[in-house]
Image (cartoon, rainbow, N blue to C red):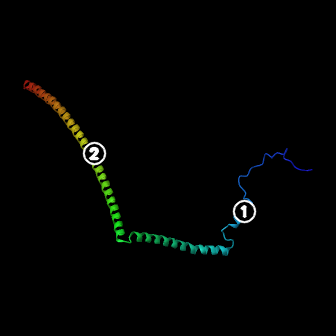
Amino acid sequence: MATSSNTGARKPANRRKTTTRRPTAARRQTQSTTSTQPKTRVDQAQALAERAVLVPVGASLLARDNLVTTVKDLTTKYRSRTGLEREFKRFERRGVTARNRFERQMRRTRTRVERELRLRRNSVQRTVKQNRRRVEREVRSVRRDLEKQSGTFSARVEKLVSDAQDRLPAVS
């Protein structure tokens, strides 16, 4: 009997595993039968024409449904006078809330701006005051120095004049 057995046979070492899967027979069948692509040019043109007609029709039906829903909602809300007044009160409350929120925000902004202005004004006033004191101090110092120098200058001039006067009578 010539039967093959796997007991001594080994797999070759250079055999690679493939990472791509091959479709099974069942998958190949479903792919070919469920394909939505038309086969012939005539079928392709027909599908394209149907699509060109059906897209706007579907869009207009969707818009119609949305409009009908909106109108139904409005008619249920505003069917009676009480419903209309209820909606007006709701709008008024919402407006009051928005106005109050806006006023609070404006007050906060005004307060923040006033605070910043006050801080900057105080900083400028402080800087001006410091600079004025520094300039006044420098002026006083320069004045004292000039007074000292003028005092010593006048003393020297007086000494020179007296020395000159002492020498002048001796010359004449």
Res 133 quadrant in image:
top left
Residue at the disc numbered 1: 28
Above or below residue 149? Residue 23 is below
**Nearest to the observer: residue 134 or residue 84:** 84
Above or below residue 162? Residue 12 is below
Nearest to N terminus: mark 2 or mark 1: 1
How packed mark 1 is, by other alpha carbons closer than 10 Å (few <14, some 14-19, many 20 or more), is few
Residue at the disc numbered 2: 119
Mark 2 touches mark 1? (CB < 8 Å): no
**Nearest to the observer: residue 121 or residue 93:** 93
Above or below residue 85? Residue 131 is above
Q: Residue at x 67, y 75 (%)?
A: 42
Q: SS class of the residue under badge 1?
A: helix
Looking at the picture, how far across and down is residue 74, in whole percent? 41, 70
**Nearest to the observer: residue 77 or residue 94:** 77
154 vs 18, left or right, is: left
Q: Nearer the viewer, mark 2 or mark 1?
A: 1
Q: Which residue is drawn at 31% across and 54% down?
A: 104
The amino acid at mark 2 is Leu
Looking at the picture, how far across and down is residue 34, in whole percent? 68, 66
The amino acid at mark 1 is Arg
Which label was assigned to residue 161? Answer: none
Q: In the image as oriented, which residue stretches furthest toward the right?
A: 1
